[in-house]
Each structure stands twice: as C-alpha cells, then as structure tokens.
Image: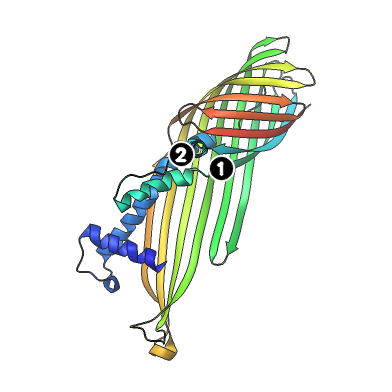
Amino acid sequence: MKRIVLSLILSALFFSGSFAVTIDQLTNQVISSLNNILTGAMTPISTVMAEHMGYYTGSGNVSPVDTAGNFQTEFGFGFGLNFTSVFFDVLAHQNPLTNSSNNPTDAFNNLGPAFSIIPFPYDDGYFKLGLPDLPMDVGVRFGIVPTISVTVNGSSFSYQEIHFGAEARYVLWDFMSLLKVDARLSLDYDGGTIKYSYTGSDLEYVNGDPLDVGTNNYTVNFTYQWGGVSIGTKVMGGLNIPILGSLYGGLGLNMNLGSVTTSLGMNDSFSPDFANTGLSGTYPIATLNGSSQVGYNLFDIRTILGLKLFFFDFAWEYGLLNGDSAFSVFVAFKF
C-alpha cells in the first residue's frame, strides 16, 4: 500500500512540476494533484459504465404477449443477469484491456472495461391487472437487493440495489388468441451502490533503527453508485399455444435519464509509539478523494426473444447500440 501511495505522490510531483516539495511537506497543490490523479482513475469507469447502466435499468421488463383483460390478474417473480458487450469480447478472446501506450497514466483507461466485465444482477416481482372493456392491462414491478456486506481481513465489500416500475400493454391485433401483437409503454427506476474499503497499518522505522517510531494507518475507499429512469416503448408479437406456453419476440426503444458516480478516497494518519518517541495521539497526514460523474447514454434499442413453458418464462434481450445482453427467468401465474 505504501508503494501505491508513494507512486501516486511521485506522479503528482512529476505532473505538477512541484519537485521542490518533499513527501513530508505535502502542500495543497500536491494534494490537489493527487486528487486529480484519483479522479483521472475513476473517470474511465464512470464513462464506460454510463454506456451500460441505462440499458440495465430497462432490462428484465419482458413478458409473453398474453395481455390480460376484464380484471384478469397475473403475477410473477424472477431474476436475471445483465452482461455488457465487454464481457462477450473477453469470451471471444478479444482483449479490451490491451494498451499499446507507454504512458503509465493511460493504464487508467483499462479500469473502465475491466469493471464493466462484471455482470449486474436484478430481481423482480410483478403484478398485472386487466382493464374492463379494453384489450389492455396495467402492471407494476418491484425488486430489491438489501444491503449485503462482507468483511474479511481488513477488506469490506457491500452491495445494494432497488428497482421499481410500471407498464401498460395494449393489444393491436389478435387472431383467435393464438397470434397476438401488442404495444407497451413502461417507466422504470433503478439505483444502487457498490462499496469496497481496505484498512491497514504498518510500523514505521527510521534509518534502520530496530525500534519503531509509530504506526502508519491507512484506509482506501471505493464507491460506485448509479441511479436513473428508463422510459420504454415496445412492439411485441407472440404465438400462444394453449396449456403449453408461447413463443414471443419484439423490438424496444428506451430513453434513459440518470448517471454513474465513481469515487476513490484515501485516508492516512500516523500514531507515534509513546515508549520510543515520547509522543502520543494520532496525527492526520492526508485525506485524498477523486470522483467522477457521467450521464447515461440517452437511448438504447433492444430486440427481445422469449419462451414460455407452462409457468416458466425465459427471455433474452440484446442491445443493438451497445451490444449488451440481459437474460431473465421468471415464474408467472395467471388467474
């Protein structure tokens, strides 16, 4: 860890031209330079993930073309995973992390693709109600991942996410309930946070003296947050086979409004060893923080293909503009 902090300090001195400032005499200019370096490291993550989180917000809102009517009800629950195009590039052995530049700071550009390899989960429960005298239904859906925290050997990780939305479906064409085409309008919100922190300490020595002068304490905090809405329209067609299930597909257009915020912070302090130095207490050395916020891609277009077998729904969504894919599995009941 000390090597990482030292590298950041030396890099800041180099890029700011403040060679006259020593590590022990950190000035506001150097701290500002370090904060800029951390911001530069976070910007690629926010930039790359903003291309995918709008699509993620609208994912999982899929169902067969079996629009209810006359107070007919339907409810279901399930889960899914959203994979970015970078994930599939890695599977295809196309390395998105290759960097031919000899400039060490350009390595930050690899952080965005590296982070975007991680698949993002979602879970949902939904309820639909058919309207009287109209070939349409309306529904709501809700999903939540309560805060999950894991702490091991000074490292702490947490994840939480919430999702809710509403949708209306209207039948455009119906042939004996076997073949149907409907139009859909939806509004979804999704937001969440991923946090990682590491806390450690090192004994400090001076000029090879076997007696330590104190303890250097440090904490590194990484936070990834997202939040926004996705307004979607879809046209779906389906073949419904009584009792067995249905095959369905369609095309959707979504407008996304939201942002991704990524931050990295470091806190460093020193606690002298009273027995060896005669000093006590804890003295702050530096508090660093870099943060980047980037807005979602405004539009995405997706194709949808699904299969319903008895009570089980399987669906695949593919983003035509960003190459992302979402895979969903639901259990649904209709009354």
Q: Nearer the viewer, residue 222 or 260?
A: 222
> Disc 1 residue type?
Phe
State the image quarter where residue 274 is shown.
Answer: bottom left
53 left or right of 64 in image: left
Task: Indicate the quadrant where residue 187 lies.
Answer: top right
Q: Earlier in the sequence, mark 2 or mark 1?
A: 1
| Quadrant into which the C terminus falls | top right
Q: How many residues crowd mark 1 within 10 Å: few (<14), some (14–19), many (20+)? A: some
- At a point 47% along the width and 47% down the height, the residue shown is 115
Q: Secondary structure at mark 2?
A: strand
Q: CA distance from mark 2 to mark 1?
A: 17 Å
Q: Work out whether residue 59 can be spotted.
A: no
Colour logic: rainbow
| Residue 270 location (% of width, % of height) | 40, 76
Which of the labelled discs sits on residue 120, or is there none? Answer: 1
Residue 177 x, y percent position in the rendering? 72, 13
Q: Residue furthest front?
A: 93
Give the percent coordinates (x, y) of residue 304: 58, 25
